Amino acid sequence: MNSVIKGFIFDLDGVLTDTAEYHFRGWKQLADELDIPFTRESNEALRGIPRRESLMLILQGREFPEEQILEMMDRKNRYYLEFIRGITPRDLLPGAREILEEIRVAGLKSALGSASKNAVEVIERLGIADLLDAIADGNSVKLQKPAPDLFLYAAAQLGLDPSTCVVVEDAAAGIQAAQAGGFASIGLGPSERVGMADLVLPSLQGVQLNDLLARLGVSDAG
Ligand code: B16
Ligand code: MG
């Protein structure tokens, strides 16, 4: 791992805010309409997984023509868009704004690295658009996590080498993507899920930049 860190790439859902609940409600409404069983427990498997792949997991091998697949994805997204209309800065997860501000004050860079095609709308509603130097979202690259492409795109937007960036993720697929791209990684959540990250924390609450860098065994560029 490089000993100098110049930037951070943050996942959105599960790291900066908890849109997972709204994704769940959208999928649940669709699944109910299709009479397909779908529970909060099965929703856990969709963490960090893009829209089409999420639908495939819900359909569990049931086959539909492409036209209907597209309609289902669109229907779920319409429900989701309704839910996220209510997002405000109060929906930031504890510690999220504080660490973004600390990174900015320290002269380091921050980017978003989210699989969501709705990420820009969410960060604007959260009021953190001005704290992010670059956006990589579900529209930025073709290959999604666990492929490293999204994070590589984010690092390129920041003008930084992957070895100088830390990815912060809550999903196993996201940590795999970070490692595949040569990034240092911080996993938020239980070690059964993100235990392969370089550093595992319960959340960003109370987290301080210097402490993070020290625990990763790196220093900042300053
Ligand atoms: P959309 P992240 C992911 O966000 C969510 O965790 C996942 O549940 C969702 O299906 C995916 O975005 C795509 O979202 O339907 O809005 O394009 O964790 O990568 O920030
Ligand atoms: Mg996530």
Image (tube, rainbow, N blue to C red):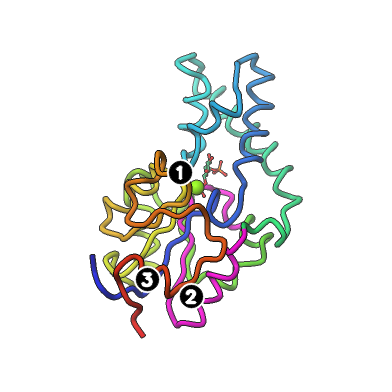
Q: Residue at x 69, y 19 (%)?
A: 33
Instruction: Report how far apart the C-alphas of labels 3 and 2 lie in the structure.
Output: 11 Å
Q: Is residue 109 magenta?
A: yes
Q: Secondary structure at mark 2?
A: helix
Q: Is residue 62 above or below residue 159?
A: above
Give amino acid for label 1. Answer: Pro
Residue type highlighted by circle 3: Leu
As measured in the structure, the alpha-carbon distance from the residue carrying label 2 to the one carrying label 1 is 25 Å
Q: Position of residue 108 (x, y in %)?
A: 43, 77
Residue marked by disc 1? 190
Q: Which residue is mark 2?
A: 103
Residue placed at 58% from the left, 32% from the top? Answer: 73
Disc 2 residue type (three-letter) = Ile
Q: Residue at x 28, y 52 (%)?
A: 179
Badge 2 crowding class, 10 Å Cα cut-off, few under 14, some 14 to 19, many 20 or more, is: many
Q: Earlier in the sequence, mark 3 or mark 2?
A: 2
Q: Residue 113: within the magenta?
A: yes
Please provide percent x and percent y for residue 43: 55, 31
Taking depth in this image into account, of 182 and 55 the one nearest to the observer is: 182
Task: Judge whether residue 115 can be spotted in this image.
Answer: no
Residue 21's tag is: none
Mark 3, Cα crowd under 10 Å, few <14 / some 14-19 / many 20+, is some
Q: Which comes before the other along the chain, label 3 or label 1?
A: 1
At x 46% / y 65%, what residue is drawn?
111
Q: Is residue 195 left or right of residue 2?
A: right
Numbered tag placed on residue 213 in the rendering: 3
Percent position of residue 220, x then y: 35, 78
Q: Is residue 82 left or right of residue 3?
A: right
In the rendered structure, which segment of residues is drawn in magenta?
Answer: 94-120
Secondary structure of the residue carrying numbered label 1: loop
In the picture as drawn, the residue positioned furthest to the left comes out as: 1
